[in-house]
């Protein structure tokens, strides 16, 4: 059975999602099909400067220049997302996911991509779901599926992204942005 692809969409954790790996997260789906889904949490910066791990890339990384916790899977591996500067040109070492967004080969020499990329962010780990798993989590009320805006993966205020994404919705969903971190303290 064919699955409608959610690639390029945001998964926004509902207040019901209490898994500490995903509480109040915003996940950008990089790939989604009948075989499962893969995404990165885009609102969890770490305190680790990119320069301390991938020194050659630090001059190209967008603010804040730190690694982001991309998810609980393969946290010892890095994945980089970047926009191309010119949508008509695909630089060597960059693979298009959708639109202007793609994955960067961090094994490539950074100089190869200099000038060809716009914003770039590096993630430690990723979020992954097996076949049907994400669809079940959505059906059970764990995630809102919302449209991504081009600035979302590169926001300068990642800590506020969960609330901002919810607030910009044109429905009662915008009220969820005011949901307290701990409802028992309300």
Image (cartoon, helix red, strand yellow):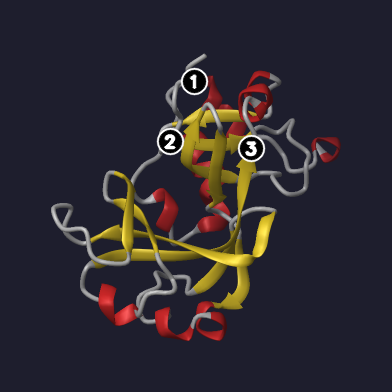
Which percent across, then down, holds residue 86? 16, 58
Q: Is residue 171 above or below residue 38?
A: above
Q: For residue 77, what is the image quadrant?
A: bottom right
Q: Do the numbered discs 3 and 1 sit on residues whose CB atoms are within 8 Å? A: no
Q: For residue 115, what is the image quadrant?
A: bottom left
Label 2 sits on a secondary structure element that is: loop
Cα–Cα span, label 1 and label 2: 11 Å
Q: Is residue 83 above or below residue 161?
A: below
Which percent across, then down, holds residue 122? 49, 66
Q: How many marks?
A: 3
Question: What residue is shown with label 3?
Answer: 129
Which percent across, then down, holds residue 40? 54, 50
Question: What residue is shown with label 2?
Answer: 7
Cα–Cα span, label 3 and label 1: 14 Å
Question: What residue is shown with label 1?
Answer: 3
Could you tell me which residue is drawn at 67 percent across and 53 percent down? Answer: 73
């Amino acid at each position: 059975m064919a699955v409608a692809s959610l690639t390029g969409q945001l998964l926004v954790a509902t207040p019901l999602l209490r898994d500490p790996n995903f509480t109040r997260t915003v996940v950008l789906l990089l790939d989604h099909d009948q075989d499962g889904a893969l995404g990165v949490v885009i609102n969890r910066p770490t305190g680790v400067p990119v320069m301390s791990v991938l020194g050659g890339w630090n001059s190209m990384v967008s603010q804040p220049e730190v690694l982001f916790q991309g998810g609980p899977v393969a946290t010892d591996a890095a994945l980089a997302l970047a926009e191309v500067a010119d949508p008509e040109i695909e630089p060597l070492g960059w693979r298009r996911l959708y639109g202007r967004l793609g994955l960067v080969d961090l094994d490539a020499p950074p100089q190869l991509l200099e000038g060809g990329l716009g914003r770039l962010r590096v993630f430690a780990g990723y979020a992954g779901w097996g076949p049907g798993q994400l669809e079940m989590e959505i059906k059970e009320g764990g995630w809102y599926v919302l449209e991504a805006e081009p600035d979302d993966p590169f926001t300068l205020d990642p800590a506020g992204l969960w609330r901002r994404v919810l607030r910009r919705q044109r429905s009662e969903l915008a009220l969820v942005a005011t949901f307290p971190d701990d409802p028992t303290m309300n």
